[in-house]
Image (spheres, helix red, strand yellow):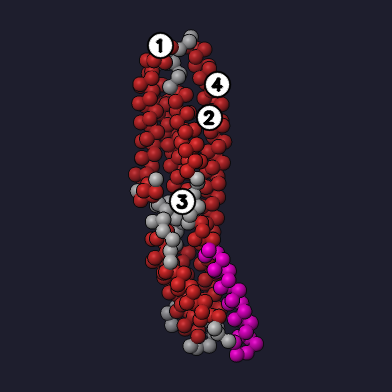
Amino acid sequence: MDWVYDLPNWLFFLLCIGTTISFAAIGLLTTRVWVKRHADEHSVQNDLVSYFLGASGVIYGIALGLVAAGVWGNFQALSGQVDEEAAITAALYQDVSAYPLPQRELLRQGLRQYVRVVIQQDWPQLRQGKMPQNSTSCLYGFKKQLFHFTPSDAGLKLIHEQALVQYNELAKVRRVRLQGSDSSLPAVLWWVIILGAAVNIIITWFFVSEHGAYHLLLTVLLALLLGSLLFLTAAMDNPFRGDFSVSAEPFQLILAQMPSH
């Protein structure tokens, strides 16, 4: 189902609510006559269905709420990791700016190249569900330059030690970002969520009403709500994919603050 993330958000939303509304409307119109023919006394039938819909709605609401909260928490955490990665990169850039020439320009150029590759190549690849590779090579080249530098005095040694600490932090948060690009709900959990939405819609078909238009309208409204919630959960499920995704803006901001000379 990864192809849905290639759709614009408005089309993805229409797909979700269109599916649930079509299922609800077609199912109700198909079963309405059969339900009226086999139903008990209407008031008793509707009381029974109301009880089951209430119980099912509560259980499904709790389950979907927990899933949505987990998905949103993961989205926020990865967004924070991107901010942290950009901040550490900026701090590391400031540290190496205190190095003597020619190491200073080599290291600053390496960091600028890393940020450019993250923006221009990492993010498009992450949005396609691919694991970036080129930024790894850039960061490895920067690491070789940094680790081969030998400080000439105590002050520079202190700055170099701080730069090494910043580099290790950068490598750690970058690894978390890349691992997070594969984070999504298991397929079995998606099947349970979709099945729960279908069960709640199906239960509404067993109400007996003399006003078919009202019954259809209420069923469609419930389907619209469930479709919207499914869309929201799916849109946030893959944090780096789709229109609603983690942005590379923090890296764009620090790149503008990295002078080329």
Kindly identify which numbered label has been placed on residue 57: 2
Q: Nearer the viewer, residue 217 or 19?
A: 19
Real-space CA distance between mark 2 and mark 3, rounded to the nearest whole angstrom: 26 Å
Real-space CA distance between mark 1 and mark 4, rounded to the nearest whole angstrom: 21 Å
Circle 1 or circle 2, nearest the eye: 1
Residue hosting label 3: 238
The span shown in magenta is: 151-175
Task: Inspect the image, locate mark 4, and give the three-letter code of the amino acid beneath it.
Answer: Tyr
Badge 3: few (under 14), some or many (20 or more) residues near its Cα, within 10 Å?
many
Give residue 2's position: percent from left, percent from top: 39, 48
Residue hosting label 4: 51
Residue 234 visible: yes
Q: Can you say whether 81 is above or below 183 in the image?
A: below
Task: Inspect the image, locate mark 2, and give the three-letter code of the amino acid beneath it.
Answer: Gly
Q: Nearer the viewer, residue 209 or 48?
A: 48
**Is tag 4's residue or tag 2's residue first in the polypeptide sequence?**
4
Kindly identify which numbered label has been placed on residue 37: 1
Quick one: quadrant of the N terminus? top left
Q: Secondary structure at mark 3?
A: loop
Residue at the farthest right position: 154
Q: Can you say whether 110 is above or below 241 in the image?
A: below
Real-space CA distance between mark 3 and mark 4, rounded to the nearest whole angstrom: 36 Å
Badge 2: few (under 14), some or many (20 or more) residues near its Cα, within 10 Å?
some
